[in-house]
Amino acid sequence: MNSYLRSQKRVVLRNCGQIDPNSIEEYISSGGYRALKRALLEMEPAAVVQTVKDSGLRGRGGAGFPTGLKWEFAAKAEGDPKFVICNADEGEPGTFKDRLILEGDPHCVIEGMVIAAYAVGASKGYLYIRGEYGQSYETITNALKQARSAGFLGNDIAGSGFGFDIVVRSGAGAYVCGEETALMESIEGKRGESRVKPPYPTDKGLWGYPTVINNVETLANIPPIIENGADWFRQIGTPTSPGTKVFTLTGDVMNRGLVEVPMGTTLRTLVFDVGGGIPRGRKFKMAQTGGSSGGCLPASLLDIPLDFDSLREVDSSLGSGALLIVDDSHCIVDVVKSFMHFFEHESCGKCTPCREGTYRLARLVEKIEDEEATLADLDVLSRLCRVMERSCLCGLGQAAPKPVLTTLKYFKEEYLVHLRDQAASKGA
Ligand SMILES: Cc1cc2nc3c(=O)[nH]c(=O)nc-3n(C[C@H](O)[C@H](O)[C@H](O)COP(=O)(O)O)c2cc1C
Ligand code: SF4
């Protein structure tokens, strides 16, 4: 077996490329909807919540919040109706894992949503999908029709007496609408802007009712957990980040695309074994984990395990699972500039620190690249980043400074060579 396959473990992607995504029969014959029947016919809702808690599954949408705990909050919250939302907005640049899960194994996500709904007592679900994902939209719509005809959606699912159905909503291309509260505003027909938290969605979510919102990959993990048990899941990955992680490998790496490895696999294994190394004889310079709002890591951190906690220790994050590899032909300031343009464009403008801050960050990085900046500008840049981290209303503005802060930490010399006053920058 070659190193590309040897390092991978397919839990979420187990059916992708193996079965016809347009055929519910093929999904069922590969064991599909068995977990749903087990949950709805043999388990109490609280036991389902407990199994997911025991598995240690943490949300794959970015923040890594424990899924079972989220479900428990929603199950205990007062309110009727309750909702389950599948977040398939996936606006993070360089991320396309949710798209390929939906296109490769749509029934697995539907099955995960029904189990979540049963666990928390929800009667209606929404699948919020990125507007540009035409193929995913068609595949999931077709799968929903099939699931309804087969009795896995609607009233009295699989003869259990439990009823639940799912509606698909298409986004209009705003990155902020992946943020859970902005997404709910969008479903409610309002402008996509983040809400102040608390209250959290499990208490007051869609139209003010208790709502569980989970990422596509999180939900795709649910059927195998119910089927094989929490202990089985805990054997994969690390003690605090069990399971696998789907990464989208992009940039200067030989094998680009979707890969699934146990949590805790090192960055080196992903870049050089699974990814096949750096093309054109160039050297590895930097990896950005977690998408545009993730940290930028240097070669000295190649042995870091990729899991929620290890990455937090080096000021980075697992985020959406995007892994951008940059070789030594690129200027770090130039790379950071493109991230800052993204955030400036995507800020929803609701809060001042982000609306003004993302604009100022972009101008400052441009000034540095144009060799017009001084050491004092570098100081302003890092102070602005700290202010934004603490004062922006939602994760977009809070995380936008991360690429700047981590490159200032690990690649400061690349900023210094751009400064106007080279003599002053020597001792910095
Ligand atoms: C700006 C921004 C964009 C986000 N985009 C997504 C997204 O596209 N998909 C997603 O699942 N979570 C996204 N999130 C995280 C969600 O707010 C939320 O934490 C997630 O859907 C919860 O699901 P999980 O617990 O399964 O991870 C985003 C957060 C922020 C701040
Ligand atoms: S942080 Fe940015 S995206 Fe979030 S509410 Fe404030 S302006 Fe909008």
Image (cartoon, rainbow, N blue to C red):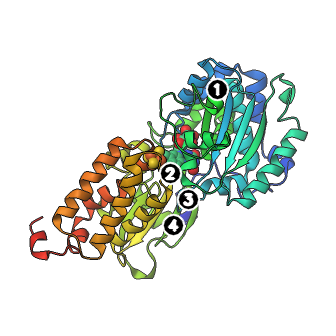
Could you tell which of marks 1 and 3 lies nearer the N-terminus? 3
Q: State the residue position of label 4.
A: 250
Could you tell which of marks 2 and 3 lies nearer the N-terminus? 3
Q: Are marks 1 and 3 in contact (CB under 8 Å)?
A: no
Q: Is residue 102 above or below residue 155?
A: below
Establish whether ligand 1 lies closer than 8 Å to the Cβ of label 1.
no
Query: Nearest the camera: 334 or 97?
Result: 334
SS at mark 3 in the image = loop
Q: CA distance from mark 2 to mark 3?
A: 21 Å
What number is the disc on residue 95?
3
> At x 34% / y 60%, what residue is drawn?
361
Q: State the residue position of label 2.
A: 348
Q: Nearer the viewer, mark 4 or mark 2?
A: 2
Q: Are marks 1 and 2 in contact (CB under 8 Å)?
A: no
> At x 48% / y 29%, what residue is drawn?
198
Could you tell which of marks 4 and 2 lies nearer the N-terminus? 4
Disc 2 crowd, CA 10 A, few/some/many (<14, 14-19, 20+)? many
- Tell me if 288 is positioned left or right of 93 in this view: left
What number is the disc on residue 209?
1
Provide residue 113's location: percent of width, then percent of height: 70, 37
> At x 60% / y 59%, what residue is drawn?
96
Establish whether ligand 2 lies closer than 8 Å to the Cβ of label 2.
yes
